[in-house]
Image (cartoon, grey):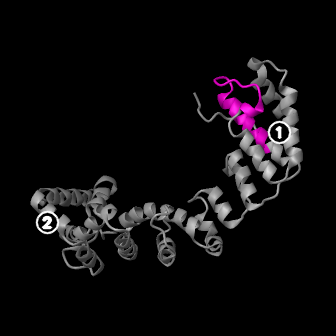
């Protein structure tokens, strides 16, 4: 919620009374306006002071249907507390009531409620297709990064492609490609993930491309882990067997045979020299850019 800085401090404080504790805490911690931060802190302190155990017990015993009704119908003086109760008591509600609360928060909530709901929507337990019009409306209005992940997971391929430019960069590139069938960008994914996505969407690979991707993974592993975890076969390197299985699922038999032949070729190399020899052999065949260590020491 944006507070007009030109209105009086009294009016600002009155407007901020409708915010819940989480929203006020956010303003108190991050708002660049000192006066708004001071007002938010003041309101939080007052709420903490006035809350007493007997009142808390009374609120928790208040029928959840009436709490939901107070929130949905914006009953004067009850909205903030109703919103707090709906979130606090959510996990203890039966599933039907949880769905009603989620619908209410999606239709009436702001940033705090969006964050609360998005985390639950991304899982399978609370999802139903009735939410699609609401999450699309939310996404088009606010473009939240959390909601982007929900959009890509549940909305139609056509809708995702329609909003592809806004969604790119806000969600997992692999998931985006799998849901749309778009060709993945190699530079955005780990080699093993790149192969998995291509296999999943039925993508095409160029000549010798499959073995190059596996060699890229082997090279990265040896640069990062070669000294600490010496190996003497490409099959000892994590994910190599899985990556070759992906190649098999894509019918790339020649790529598998070429990798196996390379492993046999390097077998005579002593264990202590194996990693260095493999890196050299790979770099002689492929023009990979100079390796940059992930953990600069």
Q: Is residue 291 above or below residue 228?
A: below
In depth, the one of 27 and 234 nearer the eye is 234
- Residue 223 drawn at (x, y percent): 69, 30
Q: Is residue 67 left or right of residue 214?
A: left
User: Marks 1 and 2: in contact by CB < 8 Å?
Assistant: no
Magenta stretch: dominant SS? Answer: helix
Q: How crowded is mark 1: few (under 14 residues within 10 Å), some or many (20 or more)?
A: few
Vertical comparison of 209 with 287: above or below:
below
Please say whether residue 291 is visible from this viewpoint.
Answer: no
Q: Which mark is residue 19?
A: none
Magenta part of the protein: which range? 213-236
Q: Nearer the viewer, residue 181 or 282?
A: 181
Which residue occupies the extreme bottom position in the image? 73
Mark 1, residue position: 287
Residue shown at 48%/68% (left/top)? 127
Quadrant where the N terminus sits is bottom left
The kind of secondary structure element at disc 1 is: loop
Q: Please, what secondary structure does the residue beneath circle 2 have?
A: helix
Q: Is residue 140 above or below residue 87?
A: below
Question: Most extreme residue toward the front, as rendered?
Answer: 94
Is residue 58 one of those drawn in magenta?
no
The residue pinned by badge 2 equals 58
Quadrant position of residue 271: top right
Left or right of 75? Residue 287 is: right
Q: Position of residue 90 (x, y in %)?
A: 32, 64
């Amino acid at each position: 919620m944006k507070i007009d800085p030109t209105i009086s401090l009294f009016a600002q404080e009155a407007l901020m009374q409708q915010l819940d504790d989480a929203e006020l805490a956010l303003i108190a911690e991050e708002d660049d306006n000192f006066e708004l931060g001071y007002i938010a802190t003041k309101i939080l302190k007052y709420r903490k002071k006035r809350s007493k155990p007997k009142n808390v017990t009374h609120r928790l015993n208040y029928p959840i249907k009436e709490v939901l009704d107070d929130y949905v119908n914006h009953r004067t003086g009850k909205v903030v507390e109703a919103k707090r109760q709906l979130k606090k008591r959510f996990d203890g509600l039966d599933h039907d009531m949880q769905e009603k609360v989620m619908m209410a928060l999606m239709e009436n909530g702001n940033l705090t409620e969006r964050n609360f709901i998005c985390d639950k929507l991304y899982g399978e337990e609370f999802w139903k297709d009735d939410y699609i019009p609401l999450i699309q409306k939310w996404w088009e209005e606010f473009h939240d990064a959390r909601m982007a992940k929900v959009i890509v997971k549940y909305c139609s391929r056509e809708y995702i492609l329609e909003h592809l430019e806004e969604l790119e960069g806000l969600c997992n590139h692999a998931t985006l490609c799998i849901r749309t069938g778009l060709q993945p960008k190699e530079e955005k994914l780990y080699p093993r993930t790149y192969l998995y996505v291509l296999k999943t969407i039925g993508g095409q690979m160029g000549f010798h491309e499959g073995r190059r991707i596996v060699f890229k993974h082997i090279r990265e592993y040896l640069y990062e882990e070669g000294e600490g975890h010496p190996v003497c076969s490409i099959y000892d390197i994590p994910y190599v067997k899985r990556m070759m299985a992906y190649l098999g699922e894509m019918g790339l038999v020649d790529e598998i045979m070429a990798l196996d032949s390379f492993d046999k070729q390097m077998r005579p190399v002593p264990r202590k020299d194996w990693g260095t020899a493999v890196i050299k052999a790979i770099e002689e065949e492929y023009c990979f850019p100079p390796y940059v260590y992930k953990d600069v020491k």
